[in-house]
């Protein structure tokens, strides 16, 4: 049977439709995916993402372990800073994408995908030096994500932490409505927002309080369905769907994450060769010229030759257009390249387009992109 | 959940409204609720000849693609063009404005495969119990 987060009863009480995701029984929607999507774009939405994994690394060797296993540069992080990064295998394939936080020089904290938490933990443990202690805290911790332009205002009513001074990807210890919480300015929706790490035993009480604050700002609970359309509009890849262990970061168009100036990290040789010109395919955004929803596995064609495959797609709730992500041969990746997507035997005209499909325009956005 | 008495139903959750020798077809209230927000509907061309049980199109929500099955033999005489731009009507009014195709019926509408409202209600109850 699928695992349940500590909020399972709360979701049922809110009338959530539950689905199995990554071995967890999770809310896919409450009032409806489109309504929840719009709430997050216009006001705010609260997500239970407690299925995600948390891994603690402690000890004098923790920083060096992070630096050798991830592709980004953790030397750039001070206490309370985090960064988006990738865990790759020796072939350069993406094992997982994650956020790594430096809580202290000898205490690092990883938030990883639910489906990969056990694999990540085993991979890190297998590479660890004796001066690092690795603890999978996934079962002990809950994770809530409050996302949207009203998120800061809603959360601000519950804590004395000065949220306005928090830069994106920073993390702070705080008391939120009486609960000891790690608050980070992160998310997976393309909006401003925060994620709250809390002891699993307190997550139901925290959920109720944060949901009440969000509701006062016009917000509502939001499920994994809206989370998927929100992240797609924001052009954010989903690990396991848009990239996997057979995809390198460069092929996933995540070259900006890879710091080749670092002399040593797992997978570096393959990535350096690809950066030097051996890249054959790459993840791009596509938009259909006619109605139709591109789905994972649909093939992409040009001049009657298959040149790629769709990895995810949807009808964009915000834009109304039919969008997706696809792996294409590099020759077909320039913006504007005409292609055709095979949807159940029909070839629909489409174009390569820039990501993100949607970019927020609020004041916070300029900070987030700086 | 609405299951109108005057309609016939398939186990795949299409409804059939018989009007003389014509049939209107759509998906049920249960089906639209299970799908969630409908974002795309693909329908056949007018003139397409369908056999009972044959797929005639698809209905998609963000998470799911579902085939549409013909309840009875017939020839498509009209399709609901409005669903191309307003697929959400399927959620709002599944038995009315959310209709999908009209058929000139050539098959047997007394087939045991077509459920009456009571039998369909029992079918839905058994699906929900799963």
Image (tube, coloured by chain):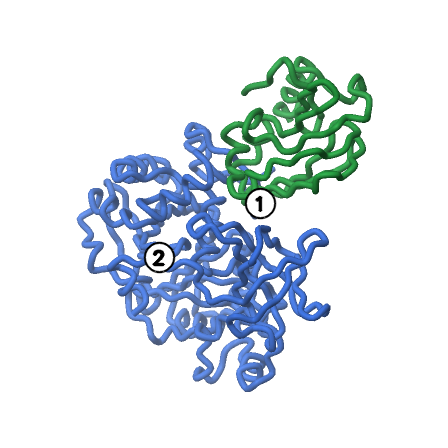
Chain colours: A blue, B green
Percent of width and height locating residue B31: 60, 30
- Spatial CA distance of label 1 from label 2 is 24 Å
The quadrant in which the N terminus of chain A is found is top right
| Residue under the image location 76 percent in, 33 percent down | B75
Left or right, A60 with respect to A329, comes to left
Q: Please report the residue visible at 54 percent of the width from the left and 20 percent of the height from the top.
A: B1
Q: Is residue A278 left or right of residue A205?
A: right
- Within 10 Å of disc 1 (Cα), the crowding (few <14, some 14-19, many 20+) is some
Where residue A210 sits, quadrant-wise, is top left
- Point out which mark residue A186 bears: 2
Q: Position of residue A183 (x, y in %)?
A: 30, 53
Element under label 2?
Answer: loop
> In this view of the protein, can residue A286 be seen by the observer?
yes
Horizontal placement of B61 versus A317: left or right? Answer: right
Specify the label residue A23 is tagged with: 1
Quarter assignment of residue A233: bottom left
Query: Tag 1's secondary structure?
Result: loop
Going from the N terminus, do you reach mark 1 or mark 2 first?
1
- Give neighbour class at mark 2: few <14, some 14-19, many 20+ (Cα, 10 Å): many
Image coordinates of residue A12 in percent, x first then y, are 46, 30
Residue, x 55% and y 33% (percent of image)? B90
Q: Nearer the viewer, residue A356 or A225?
A: A356
The answer as to whether the residues below labels 1 and 2 share one chain is yes
Residue A298 in which image quadrant: bottom right
**Which is more toward the observer, A232 or A173?**
A232
- Kindly identify which chain the residue marked by label 2 belongs to: A
Query: Does the rendering let one see residue A90?
Result: no
Q: Are marks 1 and 2 in contact (CB under 8 Å)?
A: no
Q: Residue at x 56, y 82 (%)?
A: A269
**In the image, A140: left or right of A285?**
left
Q: Which chain hosts label 1? A: A
């Amino acid at each position: 049977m699928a695992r349940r987060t500590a909020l399972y009863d709360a979701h049922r009480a809110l009338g959530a439709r539950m689905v199995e995701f990554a071995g967890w029984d999770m809310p896919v929607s409450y009032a409806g995916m489109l309504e929840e999507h719009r709430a997050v774009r216009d006001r705010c939405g609260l997500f239970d993402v407690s299925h995600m994994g948390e891994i603690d690394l402690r000890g004098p060797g923790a920083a060096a372990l992070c630096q050798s296993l991830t592709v980004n540069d953790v030397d750039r992080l001070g206490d309370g800073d985090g960064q988006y990064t990738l865990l790759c295998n020796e072939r350069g394939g993406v094992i997982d994408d994650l956020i790594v936080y430096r809580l202290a020089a000898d205490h690092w904290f990883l938030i990883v995908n639910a489906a990969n938490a056990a694999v990540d933990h085993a991979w890190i443990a297998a590479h660890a030096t004796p001066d690092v202690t690795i603890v999978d805290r996934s079962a002990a911790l809950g994770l809530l994500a409050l996302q949207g332009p009203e998120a800061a205002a809603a959360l601000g009513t519950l804590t004395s932490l000065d949220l306005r001074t928090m830069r994106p990807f920073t993390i702070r210890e705080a008391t939120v409505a009486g609960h000891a919480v790690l608050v980070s300015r992160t998310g997976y929706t393309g909006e401003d927002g925060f994620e709250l790490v809390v002891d699993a035993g307190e997550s139901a009480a925290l959920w109720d309080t944060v949901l009440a604050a969000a509701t006062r700002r016009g917000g509502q609970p939001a499920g994994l369905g809206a989370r998927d359309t929100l992240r797609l509009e924001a052009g954010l890849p989903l690990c396991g769907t848009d990239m996997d262990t057979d995809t390198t970061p460069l092929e996933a168009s995540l070259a900006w994450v890879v710091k080749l100036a670092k002399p040593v990290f797992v997978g570096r040789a393959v990535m350096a060769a690809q950066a030097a010109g051996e890249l054959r395919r790459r993840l791009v955004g596509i938009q259909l010229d006619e109605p139709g929803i591109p789905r994972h596995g649909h093939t992409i064609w040009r001049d009657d030759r298959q040149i790629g495959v769709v990895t995810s797609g949807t009808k964009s709730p915000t834009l109304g257009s039919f969008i997706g992500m696809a792996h294409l041969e590099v020759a077909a990746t320039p913006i504007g390249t005409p292609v055709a997507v095979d949807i159940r035997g029909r070839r629909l005209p489409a174009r390569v387009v820039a990501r993100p499909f949607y970019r927020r325009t609020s004041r916070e956005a300029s900070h987030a992109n700086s | 959940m609405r299951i109108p008495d005057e309609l016939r139903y398939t186990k795949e959750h299409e409804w059939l409204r018989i009007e003389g020798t014509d049939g209107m077809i759509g998906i049920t209230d249960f089906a639209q609720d299970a799908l969630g927000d409908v974002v795309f509907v693909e329908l056949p061309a007018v003139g397409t000849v369908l056999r009972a049980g044959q797929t005639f199109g698809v209905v998609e929500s963000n998470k799911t693609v579902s085939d549409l099955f013909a309840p009875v033999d017939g020839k498509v005489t009209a399709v609901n063009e409005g669903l191309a731009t307003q697929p959400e009507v399927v959620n709002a009014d599944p038995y009315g404005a959310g209709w999908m195709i009209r058929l000139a019926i050539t098959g047997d509408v007394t087939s045991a495969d077509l459920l009456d409202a009571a039998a369909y209600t029992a079918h839905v109850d058994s699906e929900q119990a799963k």
